[in-house]
Image (cartoon, rainbow, N blue to C red):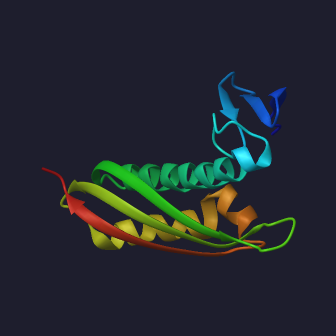
Amino acid sequence: MATKARIKWVEGVMFVAESGSGHAVVLDGAPQAGGRNLGARPMEMVLMGTGACTAFDVVTILRKGREAVSDCVAELEAERAETDPMVFTRIHVHFVVTGRKLDPAKVERAVKLSAEKYCSASAMLAKTAAITTDFEIREAA
């Protein structure tokens, strides 16, 4: 299964990235790197993509398990290597899952399945980064 993207240089260190499905996003650097701070940094996009990938899994698994999930937030914090290529060395994902009478064992299972089996972004980043997860459950109003 092929996935495509097209990255077009705009100016300085600003680029427009277009996904194979036709969605576009602006990426830019910090002013000290020659950017104008008009978009997310490329490595921020990698981290955001990882968070979206794993949150997608968690929501999908919980819904398939007939859990009444109404919200899921993945909060990520990462550390990078001090020297080039400055890969991620540590990533922590904190899930805040909201719903009605959610089963903590099912939420824990969904988080674990995403981390260990389904999230392709996490699987790739785990080659250089220690990835940890935890979660909290909030009752929907």
Which x, y percent locates residue 21? 69, 25
Q: Position of residue 55 (x, y in %)?
A: 49, 53
Which quadrant would residue 137 be assigned to in this image?
bottom left
- Residue 80 coordinates in the image, percent (x, y): 71, 70
Q: Residue furthest front?
A: 32
Residue 5 lies left or right of residue 52; in this view the side is right
Name the image quarter holding residue 47.
bottom right
Q: Is residue 91 above or below residue 29?
A: below
Q: Is 34 placed above or below 44 here?
A: above
Residue appearing at x 38%, y 70% in the figure: 135
Which quarter shows the N terminus? top right
The answer to whether residue 102 is seen in the rendering is: no
Can the viewer see residue 98 in this picture? Answer: yes
Is 2 in front, or is 136?
A: 136
Above or below, 122 against 22 in this view is below
Residue 117's x, y, as percent? 62, 65
Residue most extreme to the right:
84
Q: Is residue 7 above or below residue 65?
A: above
**Left or right of 89, for residue 50:** left
Name the residue located 55 percent from the left edge and 62 percent from the top edge.
114
